[in-house]
Image: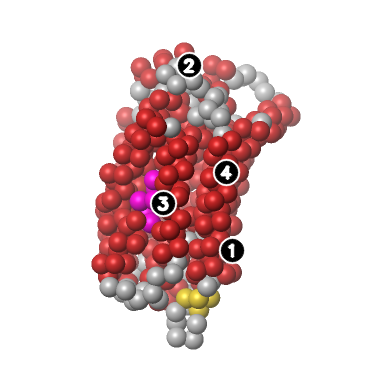
Amino acid sequence: MMPLGPQLMRVFEISPQEFGFIVSAYTFSAGITGFLSAFFIDKFDRRTALLFLYSGFTIGTFLCGIAPTYLTLVLARIVAGGFGGVLGALIFAVIGDCIPEERRGAATGTVMSAFSIASVAGVPIGLYLANHFGWHFPFFMLAALSAVALTLAYKELPSMRGHLQTHASHETPLEAIQKLYALVSTPNHRNALLFMMLLMVGGFTVIPYISPYFVANVGMSESELPLIYFFGGAATIFTSRFVGHLADRFGKAKVFTFMSLSSIAVIYAITNVPQVPLVLALMITTLFMITMNGRLVPAVALVTSSVEPKSRGSFMSINSSAQQLASGASSFVAGLIVGKAADGTMTNYHLVGLLAIGATILCLFLVQRIRLIEEVGKVPVQETALLKDV
């Protein structure tokens, strides 16, 4: 969605604030459904839940492609977000269930490198389709690829039921609410949730407006935008796994701190860059993606390890909900800050950068307060059996 910003703003004749709402619609929807799913997500086989959620995401993506107006596109994004947000949380819950703590950073980096591959291949292809056939076509392509992936998942994914051994078969709604309250009221869990929310603020205030800013202020053409995601994605394919291995070796909090400190200068640069040669612009955007991705890998691995396996699905759903709501609020607030000058350039993007830097600094303090639940090298008995199945 975000690389399509300049085209959607032109086609629908909408402001940066209205475009920010398209982005926020997905994340707000994901946040609400993520919270609701926390009441029951740990009661299902991980495979069953994944297939159901991915089916809904595929349908929602197709609805985005056939949306004829701005309003219907927003509604379709709400449908896609309702399923997609919970799906992302469940994937990381599976990592927590299947992979022991001492290898969880590398596993998280491997999974997140898939996003990088998608940036290298999917985003440039999607922008090519949008530029030549209209903005609808990237959604059609994504829906078709999702249908293929859904079929493969149905055939290949094993049953994942190890976490069900610790759950009561008959739990009243009141008991579920009390259990969820106890989960989020734990100081360690509260710190983890606040940490991830601030991390989203430190990224999603800036990210949705990179494409519009680089077209309007830096001088890139819409046809050159795929290069941002090609080079950035190509770099993070390698750095995601590398950072994950570093997190396992030196500690997730230490690696997060290093990557976050590195990201502060890059955030300032990307939100203040004037018109520069294309090569320099791509160097800045690539460094931005490397540092953003580099701090997210150890952060996700750290938070996944901060909760017991029996409650991991519920907690990761709440965590996803918190992230999505924070992301949506960040995009919305950033949309209120940025503006458009008479000559078409974006204004106040540097203020958005300062907001992101402030949130990043707060994360540096919070990361020291998150405690790992599992001992390094120790895999719970139920997860050992699950490892054999997978």
Residue type at mark 1?
A: Val
Q: Is residue 289 magenta?
A: yes
Query: Mark 3: few, some, or many residues within 10 Å (few <14, many ≥20)?
Result: some
Task: Please tell me which of labels 2 and 4 falls first in the chain.
Answer: 4
Quick one: quadrant of the C terminus? top left
- Residue at image position (34%, 56%) is 287
Residue type at mark 4?
A: Phe
- The residue where tag 4 is placed is 365
- The stretch of residues the image draws in magenta is 288-294
Q: Is there a contact, CB below 8 Å, between mark 3 and mark 2?
A: no
- The residue where tag 1 is placed is 333
Real-space CA distance between mark 2 and mark 1, rounded to the nearest whole angstrom: 42 Å
Task: Please tell me which of labels 2 and 1 falls first in the chain.
Answer: 1
Residue type at mark 3?
A: Ser
Q: Indicate whether 331 appears above or below 165.
A: below
Query: Mark 4: few, some, or many residues within 10 Å (few <14, many ≥20)?
Result: few
Report which quarter residue 111 is drawn in.
Answer: top left
- Residue at image position (48%, 51%) is 80
